[in-house]
Image (spheres, rainbow, N blue to C red):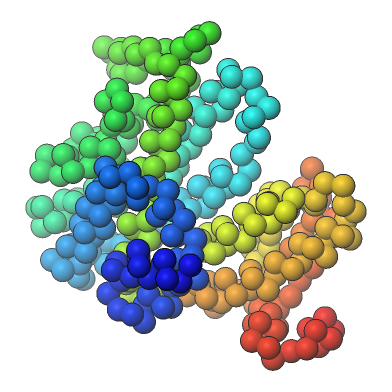
């Protein structure tokens, strides 16, 4: 993994030290990279987007990093929404085709509005900075205006962000179709309607619809990874502008996503996370056919990893002193819990504690 990460991602970092410091995060990001890097059009889009951020830093470092810092909370929240959507999605294999399509329309809405749009707002702002040397206040722009008013010089490079590759329906209209349920599911096709006043209608096959779903996920992965790599390069300056880690909202780091994903693989179901004073807490449902005690013993094994993930995250390192895992029932009631101090977990990970000392 380390060799692959270095081969594919080292070139996106300004310094060896910054690259080495973020290897743990990059273990998951390389998986996101692999999902689109073999698709030439998406890989070109990723590199263009990353290069845009880099060019803006070179053009005006102070303004560019201030823009990154000002958007940081909104951008970070997209990871929370993306992870939550991913982790709590139902098993659609048991759905009827109609229910499955309805579910994926909901996923389109959540992906485009909750995850992609905030990142596109940042991209829109930096495109204007590079091309026009101006900072555009686009905070009040709706999705359609963001797309319509993107500078013409950039549109050809980011067309996959602006419209789907099959029917050329604008990205914001796919969000509207999904959010307003402007679709009809027929026996062998789907009819979608969009637009104001002059309503457009398009009939698409089931297979093409699932390609649209994949497109929405691919463009999010592309824009997200370009922005994540940029943030990692300049994180010290971003943190300084925001007044230190204590003034920053918690993010769902890639390492945290990996921990929860691994827990789900072995039978747990992620429910939510929460902050309890200086304790970061995960709520999960226990393993099927296991009693509560057995589930808790197994689940608590993640606390070491969770503690290290928090400590390695410069954004939240100073915010939490402990990590906690709760086993909850279908109503969210806590059935059992385990807590560990981050300091103790780190000592154990570094070999500074025996098992007996660790459990005492």
Task: Work out which quarter of the rendered image holds the C terminus and state it.
Answer: bottom right
- Is there any visible trace of residue 115 in the rendered image? yes
Could you tell me which residue is drawn at 45 percent across and 50 percent down? 78
Q: Quadrant of residue 21?
A: bottom left
Could you tell me which residue is drawn at 43 percent across and 16 percent down? 205
Toward the bottom, the furthest residue is 352
Q: Quadrant of residue 133?
A: bottom left
Decide if residue 229 is on the left or right side of residue 355.
left
- Is there any visible trace of residue 231 in the rendered image? no
Decide if residue 188 is on the left or right side of residue 117.
right
Q: Is residue 325 above or below residue 291?
A: below
Q: Quadrant of residue 236?
A: bottom left
Decide if residue 59 is on the left or right side of residue 240.
left
Count of picture labels: 0
Front residue (pair 187, 228): 187
Toward the top, the furthest residue is 187
Residue 76 pos. (x, y %): 44, 57
Could you tell me which residue is drawn at 76 percent across and 71 percent down? 339
Residue 71 pos. (x, y %): 35, 57
Residue 182 pos. (x, y %): 44, 17
Front residue (pair 214, 123): 214
Could you tell me which residue is drawn at 83 percent across and 58 percent down? 295
Residue 54 pos. (x, y %): 21, 64
Decide if residue 138 is on the left or right side of residue 236.
left
Q: Is residue 192 above or below residue 332?
A: above
């Amino acid at each position: 993994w380390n060799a692959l990460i270095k081969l594919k991602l080292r070139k996106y970092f300004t310094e060896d030290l910054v690259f080495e410091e973020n290897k743990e995060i990059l273990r998951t990001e390389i998986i996101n990279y692999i999902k689109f890097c073999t698709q030439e059009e998406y890989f070109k889009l990723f590199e263009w987007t990353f290069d845009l951020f880099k060019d803006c830093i070179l053009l005006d470092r102070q303004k560019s990093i201030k823009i990154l810092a000002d958007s940081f909370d909104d951008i970070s929240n997209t990871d929370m929404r993306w992870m939550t959507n991913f982790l709590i999605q139902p098993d659609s294999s048991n759905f009827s085709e109609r229910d499955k399509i309805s579910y994926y329309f909901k996923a389109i809405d959540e992906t485009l509005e909750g995850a992609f749009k905030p990142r596109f707002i940042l991209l829109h702002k930096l495109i204007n900075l590079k091309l026009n040397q101006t900072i555009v206040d686009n905070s009040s722009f709706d999705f359609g205006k963001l797309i319509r008013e993107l500078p013409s010089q950039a549109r050809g490079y980011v067309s996959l962000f602006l419209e789907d590759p099959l029917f050329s329906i604008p990205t914001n209209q796919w969000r509207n179709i999904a959010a307003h349920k402007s679709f009809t599911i027929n026996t062998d096709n789907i009819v979608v309607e969009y637009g104001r006043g002059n309503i457009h209608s398009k009939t698409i096959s089931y297979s093409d619809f699932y390609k649209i779903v994949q497109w929405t996920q691919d463009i999010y992965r592309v824009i997200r990874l370009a922005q994540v790599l940029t943030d990692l390069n300049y994180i010290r300056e971003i943190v300084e502008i925001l007044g230190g880690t204590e003034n920053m909202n918690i993010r769902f780091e890639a390492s945290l996503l990996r921990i929860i994903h691994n827990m789900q693989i072995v039978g747990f179901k992620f429910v939510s996370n929460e902050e309890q004073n200086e304790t970061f807490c995960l709520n999960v449902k226990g393993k099927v056919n296991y009693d509560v005690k057995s589930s808790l013993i197994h689940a608590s094994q993640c606390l070491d990893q969770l503690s290290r993930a928090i400590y390695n995250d410069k954004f939240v390192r100073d915010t939490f002193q402990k990590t906690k895992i709760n086993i909850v029932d279908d109503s969210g009631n806590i059935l059992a819990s385990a807590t560990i101090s981050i300091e103790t977990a780190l000592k154990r990970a570094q070999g500074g504690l025996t098992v007996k000392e660790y459990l005492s």
